[in-house]
Image: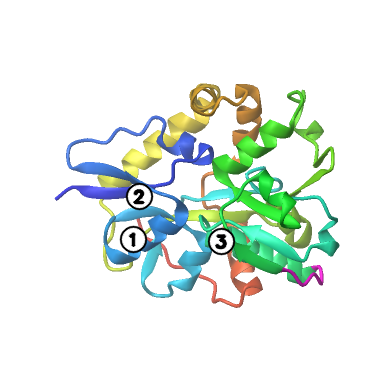
Amino acid sequence: MAYRIGLPHYVNTAPLVHFLKTPMGVEIRWGVPTELNNWLLEGCVDLSLVSSYFYLQQQGLLRALPDFSVSVLGPVYSVSLFHKKPWRQLRRVAVTGESATSVRLLQYLLAQSGVSADLIAVETGLEGLDEFDGVLLIGDRALLAYASLLKETPHSVHALPARIGEIRISDLSMRWFHASQLPFVFAVWATSAGEQPPLEVVQLLRSARRKGIGQLAEVAASESRRLSINPVLLQHYLWNFRYHLEIPDRLGLGAFAEAVGLPARDEYWAV
């Protein structure tokens, strides 16, 4: 039976998979984060990117690779709350069903601000602002929504606006950074705690990551053709990501665990 790897089809994971070669006996299964979480737990995939909140919840059932993550120190641009009312006036917020981590992070950030808002699971885009005070979008949908609001591509990431017309864009990763001064870990690579991944598979992932990070312009150009978003904007976006699991990232993961009342995880495969 083939060794199955679970992946989300988002721009932010493109540097990990654009150069990924899958030899005979290895296959990729694509899904959104909540699907990947369930597939790994059910045994439908053997190794998968899983959301950090899910990983923290599954004490003893999952184990992560020691040097992989999808993390950001500062703004992420693709986990954003779009809203017209000020943050402290939010009362009804539409949230995506694609990612429990982003929803849990939003809950924490609202509570830290003393904001009591109802989070309603409904799939909608910016049109949802006619009904809700805010709409949480993640991944490619957040990027497409943001790009649709921009009249031109700014010359620098520092010039990317947090408000366009009447729509405010609250970047949840940036709010986390202001609160913690730490990176936010959105996802880790994990397997069942009893199934160590083959070294040759991990080496494939490391090789693909090395090439992807080293050739971000090519990766961004490819994703630009897929989504019809300016490649310069996508390259700005990809520059922000941290694809290793270094000490600051582990500290950030531990801080998030503490923030949501879960034990910190510090068990990783020795591969």
Q: Residues within 10 Å of mark 1 (few under 14, many from 20)?
A: many
N-terminal of the two: label 1 or label 3? 1
Q: Identify the residue at horizontal 79%, vertical 62% (top origin).
A: 90
**What's the distance in space between the residues labelled 1 and 3, CA to CA?**
16 Å
Amino acid carrying label 1: it is Leu
Q: Are marks 1 and 2 in contact (CB under 8 Å)?
A: yes
The numbered mark at residue 6 is: 2
* Residue 250, x across and y down, in percent: 57, 60
**What's the distance in space between the residues labelled 1 and 2, CA to CA?**
8 Å
**What's the distance in space between the residues labelled 3 and 2, CA to CA?**
17 Å
N-terminal of the two: label 1 or label 2? 2
* Residue 72, x across and y down, in percent: 63, 48
Please check the rendered image and state whether residue 114 is part of the magenta-colored stretch, yes or no.
yes
Magenta residues? 113-117
Which residue is at the far left?
Answer: 1
Q: Main secondary structure of the magenta part?
A: loop
Q: Which residue is mark 1?
A: 40
Residue 81 appearing in the image = no
Q: Examine the image and state in which quarter residue 121 appears.
A: bottom right
Q: Tell how many labels.
A: 3
**Mark 3: which secondary structure?**
helix
Amino acid carrying label 2: it is Gly
Q: Identify the residue at horizontal 60%, vertical 58% (top origin).
A: 102
The numbered mark at residue 101 is: 3
Q: Nearer the viewer, residue 68 or 175?
A: 175
* Residue 107, x across and y down, in percent: 67, 67
Amino acid carrying label 3: it is Thr
Q: Nearer the viewer, residue 188 or 149?
A: 149
